[in-house]
Image (tube, grey):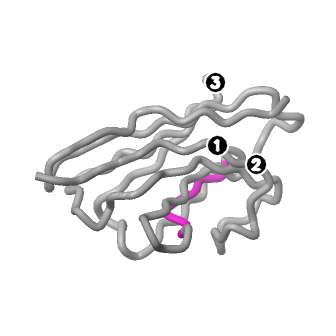
């Protein structure tokens, strides 16, 4: 059974850093586009970043460019999201997601084939 398991969420002060990890298991194919969505209270789920485990191509939404860095470790079947200079508006539940099609030009909820359960990130003083 395909699973995505997130870890690394928590409470951090504005300007601080967190590192999210997503571990996948039980997937039928070797390569996917893996990434992160987030959903703040009362808002729609939005795509944050994704990476192709096949060729390493990367997508970031504009609001996180220069602050977040996504990376892959294919040997461990994990994808990490390093989040620096965090702002209160980054507060959300962060969901790991996977897409079968190797395309990173868009990263919308309709593109996703698999979802994790989410991990809460709270940025507050």
**Residue 109 is inside the magenta segment:** no
User: What numbered label is drawn on residue 75?
Assistant: 3
Q: Main secondary structure of the magenta part?
A: strand
Please, which residue is most extreme toward the top here? 76
Query: Label 1 belongs to which residue?
Result: 116
The location of residue 5, given as percent across then percent down, is 60, 33
User: Who's the residue at 82% across and 53% down the image?
Assistant: 100
Residue 79 image offset from top left, x and y in percent:
55, 39
Residue 102 image point, x, y percent: 77, 58
Q: Residue at x 54, y 59 (%)?
A: 37
Q: Residues within 10 Å of mark 3 (few under 14, many from 20)?
A: few
SS at circle 1: loop
Q: Which residue is mark 2?
A: 114
Residue 3 place in picture, x, y as percent? 73, 33
Q: CA distance from mark 2 to mark 1?
A: 7 Å
Q: Is residue 50 magenta?
A: yes
The boundaries of the magenta stretch are: 46-52
Mark 3 or 2: the one toward you: 2
Q: Are marks 1 and 3 in contact (CB under 8 Å)?
A: no
Describe the element under mark 2 as helix, strand or loop. Answer: strand
Task: Point out the residue furthest to the right here.
Answer: 28
Q: Is residue 26 left or right of residue 33?
A: right
């Amino acid at each position: 059974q395909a699973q995505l398991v997130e870890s690394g969420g928590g409470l951090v002060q504005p300007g601080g850093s967190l590192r999210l990890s997503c571990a996948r298991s039980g997937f039928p194919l070797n390569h996917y586009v893996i990434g992160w969505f987030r959903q703040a209270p009362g808002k729609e789920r939005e795509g944050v970043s994704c990476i192709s485990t096949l060729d390493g191509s990367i997508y970031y939404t504009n609001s996180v460019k220069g602050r977040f860095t996504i990376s892959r470790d294919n040997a461990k079947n994990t994808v990490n999201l390093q989040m620096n200079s965090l702002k209160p508006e980054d507060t959300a539940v962060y969901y790991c997601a996977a897409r079968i099609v190797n395309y990173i030009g868009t990263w919308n909820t309709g593109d996703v084939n698999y979802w994790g359960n989410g991990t809460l990130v709270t940025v507050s003083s």
